[in-house]
Amino acid sequence: MTDALTEKRIAQVTTVDIGKTSGIWRYGSIDQSPAVFESRLRNGLVVTVDRVANTLFLCTDAGNFLALGYLSGRITYHAPGAEAPKNSCLRVRFDDDSTLSVVISLWGLIRALRAEDRAAFVAKWYGHAIEPNSEQCTWEGFRDAVDQVDDPKLSAKKFLHAFEPGYYLSGLDSGYAIEILHRARIHPKRALVSLTRAEQKACYASADRVMDEGIRSGGRVSEVDLYGRPGNFLPHVCSLRVGQPCLECGTPITKFSFEGGSCYACTTCQPLVLR
């Protein structure tokens, strides 16, 4: 994005008008009117692109930001003259006639922020914004966050990827949380308070390894980059591996519903009932 978008001036911003539609937009993907996006972003020159956890911030020379985060969908750059998808919930057209489009399949977090809004936005959605693979992410911090949880119903999975603002790690989605737990040999349904200290350490180390592998591989095979190219990271447990043998023990990978979505696990490597 830095290479593709910096020094481009925004000519037009088109968003879904949430006051005139229904469905997934009601989950808060976009909770501002088209007029807010236009007034804060139009005519702005993109000067930097940075991120916090899984939210990208396109900063303009006016000091305002376009925030794109928690996306189940895709962000795509279209060369000058190319058409953006008709089902885009957001289209940013630049003065060279290139376009950035956002398509949401389930949920997202799209906002036009003023400079003074950014700190509150980050605090609300990410808390301390501790990312795997970062200097701020330490075993001691992870351990202490686990120890502070006294909810007997909080699952290991939700601890890793809960929104607003999460418990410790920021920016993980459900798929990566499931993969982290598989590599740590912990069932997603396990209560966090049931984990031994050794299992907690395994989970912490697994988060670092899985995210490093995902980043180096350009994302999952189910994800695409800014130009629509898929990643090369195939998780050990995911929809594409249901029924296939576990890479560790050979037991078929199973699928089940949990906490409003699909989960995947190896019942041998990740027993729900402790032996």
Image (tube, rainbow, N blue to C red):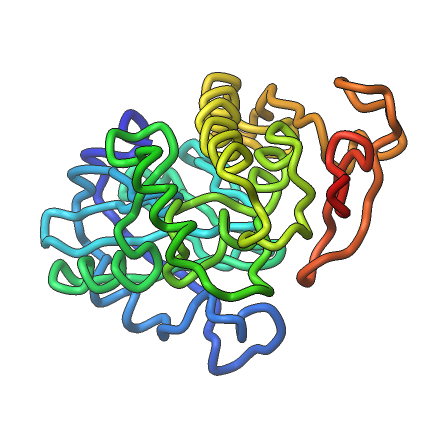
Q: Is residue 274 left or right of residue 166?
A: right
Q: Residue at x 66, y 27 (%)?
A: 235
Q: Is residue 57 above or below residue 205?
A: below
For this rendering, which residue is in front, 157 or 5? 157
| Residue 264 pos. (x, y %) | 75, 41
Of residues 74 and 232, the one drawn nearer to the viewer in this rendering: 232
Left or right of 270? Residue 108 is left
- In the image, residue 41 lies at what x, y percent? 23, 58
Number of disc labels:
0
Residue 86 visible: no
**Which residue appears at 31% of the width and 37% of the height?**
140
State which quarter of the image contains the N terminus. Answer: top left
> Which residue, as the protein is rendered here, is positioned at the far bottom?
19
* Residue 260 vertical position relative to residue 139 in the rendered view, above or below: below
- The image shows residue 27, relative to residue 7, as above or below, that is below
The quadrant in which the C terminus is found is top right
Q: Which residue is more in the foreground, 235 or 265?
A: 265
Q: Residue at 49% of width from left, 47% of height from top?
A: 160
- The quarter holding residue 236 reads top right
What residue appears at the point 65 percent right and 38 percent down from the top-left corner?
Answer: 186
Q: Position of residue 100 (x, y in %)?
A: 41, 43
- Residue 247, located in which quarter of the rendered image? top right
Q: Is residue 190 visible?
A: yes
Please provide percent x and percent y for residue 165. Answer: 37, 60
